[in-house]
């Protein structure tokens, strides 16, 4: 077996399918997207190279900056609101045990198995100013007027509520799985030493969950940046362009306005933002001991060169 796996041709044959999939499905589309972003291509006919004109136009495009702001607001909402609640619920579920644990775990995950179209139209009915659930609740508490949550000024916050609620199940399940992988003996030892639940959470759960938190937060930020389907079905970027996100604005420009080159410029900027966000988050979550080791190795390398 060792002789088989030390054969270079065997290794190459095992790596080749994954490498071809990466090149065809990911790398080639990115390269094509970069090329088309430098053209005035409309989706039909020939593409004329215009250089960085699309990127210059992006800098002065107020709707693009609105879309980017909304995506960043959603990322902040995921990290600052959705994930702390998800961690809390995951911890409480882990403490429940028994049938209640399994039942509630399924209940919290139900929104993630429902079709995006159903979710969007469900919330459209909830937000309806005439007969929606939100309007009826406000009337119950004495509100006399009509409140349209999807109107100008409040639409972006209404959309953020839907998106944060809809993605809650995934985040909670990942945290729940991470907590389940922590050895219960560690908690028992802490309890014997007199640690409270809060102290055990701060000094045991959170440190041991760091890789899970890093993964989940990175996934949440990228998910916020590429958000499209729910927003498209709920508001289609309206009213005006108040609820445009990078995904919906890209789709609108490329397939609605037939500015295929401009849409590709947005996609290239989107990829760059995703990569930059990933690098920044990796630096934020990087272990201090790893940083010290990295600096030590860098100094050793400099001495070796000199």
Image (spheres, rainbow, N blue to C red):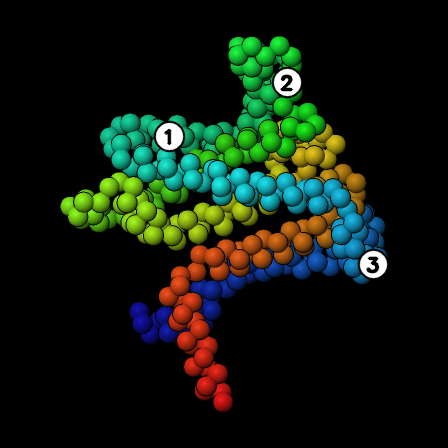
> Which residue is located at x 24 percent, y 30 percent?
98
> Which residue is located at x 47 percent, y 30 percent?
111
Q: Position of residue 214 (x, y in %)?
A: 44, 52
Quadrant in which the N terminus is drawn: bottom left
Mark pair 3, 2: CA separation: 47 Å
Q: Which residue is mark 3?
A: 50
Q: Quadrant of residue 152?
A: top right
Q: Position of residue 11 (x, y in %)?
A: 43, 69
Would you say residue 38 is visible in this rendering? yes
> Which residue is located at x 73 percent, y 39 percent?
252
79 shown above or below 166: below
200 shown above or below 242: below
Q: Which residue is mark 2?
A: 147
Residue at the far left: name it.
Answer: 192
Q: Position of residue 18 (x, y in %)?
A: 50, 59
Q: Quadrant of residue 56?
A: bottom right
Dot placed on the residue nearer the N-terminal end, 1 or 2: 1
87 shown above or below 38: above
Mark pair 1, 2: CA separation: 33 Å
Q: Which mark is residue 106?
A: 1
Q: Quadrant of residue 286?
A: bottom left
Nearer the camera: disc 3 or disc 2: 2
Q: Position of residue 168 (x, y in %)?
A: 46, 35
Residue at the far bottom: name it.
Answer: 306
Residue 266 as seen in the image, left or right of residue 95: right
Residue 115 as seen in the image, left or right of residue 269: left
Nearer the camera: disc 1 or disc 2: 2
> Which residue is located at x 37 percent, y 30 percent?
106
């Amino acid at each position: 077996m060792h002789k088989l796996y030390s054969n270079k041709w065997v290794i190459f044959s095992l790596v080749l399918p994954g490498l071809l999939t990466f090149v065809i499905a990911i790398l080639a589309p990115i390269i094509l997207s970069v090329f088309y972003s430098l053209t005035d291509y409309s989706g039909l006919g020939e593409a004329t190279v215009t250089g960085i004109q699309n990127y210059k136009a992006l800098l002065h495009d107020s709707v693009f900056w609105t879309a980017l702001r909304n995506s960043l607001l959603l990322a902040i909402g995921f990290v600052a609101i959705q994930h702390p609640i998800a961690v809390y619920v995951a911890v409480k579920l882990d403490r429940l045990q028994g049938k209640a644990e399994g039942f509630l775990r399924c209940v919290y995950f139900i929104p993630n198995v429902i079709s995006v179209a159903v979710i969007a139209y469900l919330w459209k009915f909830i937000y309806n100013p005439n007969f929606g659930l939100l309007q009826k609740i406000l009337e119950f508490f004495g509100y006399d007027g009509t409140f349209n949550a999807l109107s100008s000024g409040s639409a972006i916050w209404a959309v953020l509520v839907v998106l944060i609620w809809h993605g809650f199940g995934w985040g909670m399940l990942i945290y729940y799985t991470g907590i389940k992988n922590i050895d219960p003996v560690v908690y028992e030892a802490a309890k014997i030493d007199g640690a409270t639940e809060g102290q055990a959470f701060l000094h045991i759960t959170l440190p041991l969950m760091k890789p899970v938190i890093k993964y989940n937060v990175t996934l949440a930020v990228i998910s916020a940046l590429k958000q499209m389907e729910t927003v498209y079905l709920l508001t289609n970027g309206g009213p005006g362009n108040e609820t445009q996100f990078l995904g919906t604005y890209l789709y609108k420009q490329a397939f609605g306005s037939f500015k295929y080159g401009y849409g590709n410029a947005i996609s290239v900027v989107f990829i760059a933002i995703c990569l930059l966000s990933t690098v920044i988050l990796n630096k934020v979550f990087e272990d201090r001991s790893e940083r010290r080791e990295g600096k030590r190795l860098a100094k050793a390398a400099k001495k070796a060169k000199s």
